[in-house]
Amino acid sequence: MRLLGLLAALLLAVPQTSALPAAAARQPGSPDPLVEAVTAAMTAAVPAPDRPDLAGGQVSVLRRDQAGWAFGTAVQRTGGYPYGWLWLARREGERWRVALEGSAGFGALSRQAPVLRPAERAAFGELTESVAAAPDFRTGMRLPYAVGQAWRFTGGPHPMSGRANSSIDLAGGDGRVLAVRAGLAYRLCPGWLRVVHDRGFETDYYHLHDPISADGRRVATGDYLGRIGTDVSCGGSATGPHVHFSLRRNGDYVDIARHNFGKWVIRAGAQPYEGTAWHGSRRVAVGGTLHNYGALGFSEGIVDTDGGGVLNRRSGPGTSHPVIGTLADGATVRIECSARGTSHTGRGGYTTNLWNRLAGGGWVSDAYLWTGTGDPVSGWC
């Protein structure tokens, strides 16, 4: 009995610790300083033209540890489409330092944050790295539905939030929305998922019905994300079931035009929601259907003869070399290496003297291939 009494006295003498950091302790019903700090950061991040339309926000704390780190999602509603971010926070004394996705601070914090998993630290670190000076529109992505299906292209490039025409609308098929490339998935709102990919890319899927539960869930290319729907719980509008599909890079929305999905190159129209998609010389306007051919590899190209017909394959890099075969407009080719040759002009006035040697033999001018970049995609020969 004397031993039990001694143990009890020792336990009473040990200081008790809270499940949350001391700075997070607060009276019941009082505001959470972390939530207040994230709210202030996201409000400040909304561009001035949209601030008069602020319609309330929400902050979700996904993870929080005793060392003073936290991670979560935040959504700011406006009169139009909402803004949404991943965020990281670190407690400094009695205050929280918050970094929203896309900021330099987010990348720096992500490399240290113990609340992140190793795959998240690697992926988030790429979200603030600068894009190469030379334009590169390769995504390695397919369309957000099953390969072989054809869905309606119901809306050309238009915004999600901000000024970039980052999004297109797609509907039809079996209604199953699938990941366009492998990555880490997060739910921002009941019908809004974001997948963080490699190379600084992210994709958003909005208006979803019955989306998957996701808090950094790893998804593979083609994994199920949800079904087309009309969810507008975070803002925006939907006149019928569809997926509002958006492209982001380096933590912010970018123009989706000129990028490739399912071997279709998106082109903007004169106004938001207008536009076309191109597969070689085949043009599909809004209202048409897009067959999902699957992703275009980073060392592949799509033959675009700028008007149909066939493209000559030659025995060397230039028109002085004999023709050894032809390729159909829209064909997919794999490039082994590149060299300089005779100069040619293709779609949109693209003029180049770059020639590509193809797997299987033969050379073609880069002017008649869509690769997403004017540089060699497999190095120099």
Image: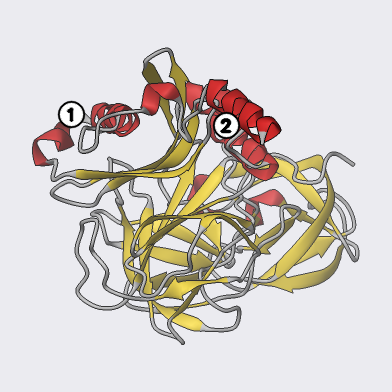
Q: Please tell me whether mark 1 sits on a helix, a strand or a loop.
A: helix
How far apart are the two marked residues, 1 and 2, measured between alpha carbons?
26 Å
Q: Position of residue 12 (x, y in %)?
A: 53, 26
* Kind of residue indicated by mark 2: Val
Q: Is residue 286 left or right of residue 62?
A: left
Q: Residue at x 83, y 71 (%)?
A: 325
Q: Name the residue: 56% across, 46% down.
A: 137
Mark found first going from the N terminus, 1 or 2: 1
**Nearer to the camera, 277 or 30:** 30
Of the two numbered discs 1 and 2 in the rendering, the one whose residue sits closer to the viewer: 1
Disc marking residue 131: 2
Q: Which numbered disc covers residue 61?
A: none
Label 2 packing within 10 angstroms: few (<14), some (14-19), many (20+): some
- Quadrant, the N terminus: top right
| Relative to 230, residue 35 above or below | above
On the picture, is 65 further left or further right than 95?
A: right
User: Which dot marks residue 48?
Assistant: 1
Would residue 134 be seen by someone viewing this image from the given angle?
no
Circle 2 SS class: loop
Q: Quadrant of the C terminus?
A: top right
Front position in the image: 65 or 2: 2
Residue 301 horizontal/vertical position (percent): 69, 58
- Residue 123 x/y as whole percent: 62, 41
Q: Are circles 1 and 2 on residues that touch, CB within 8 Å?
A: no
Q: Residue at x 54, y 62 (%)?
A: 261
Name the residue at the top extreme. 93
Quadrant of res 292: bottom right
Identify residue type, mark 1: Ala
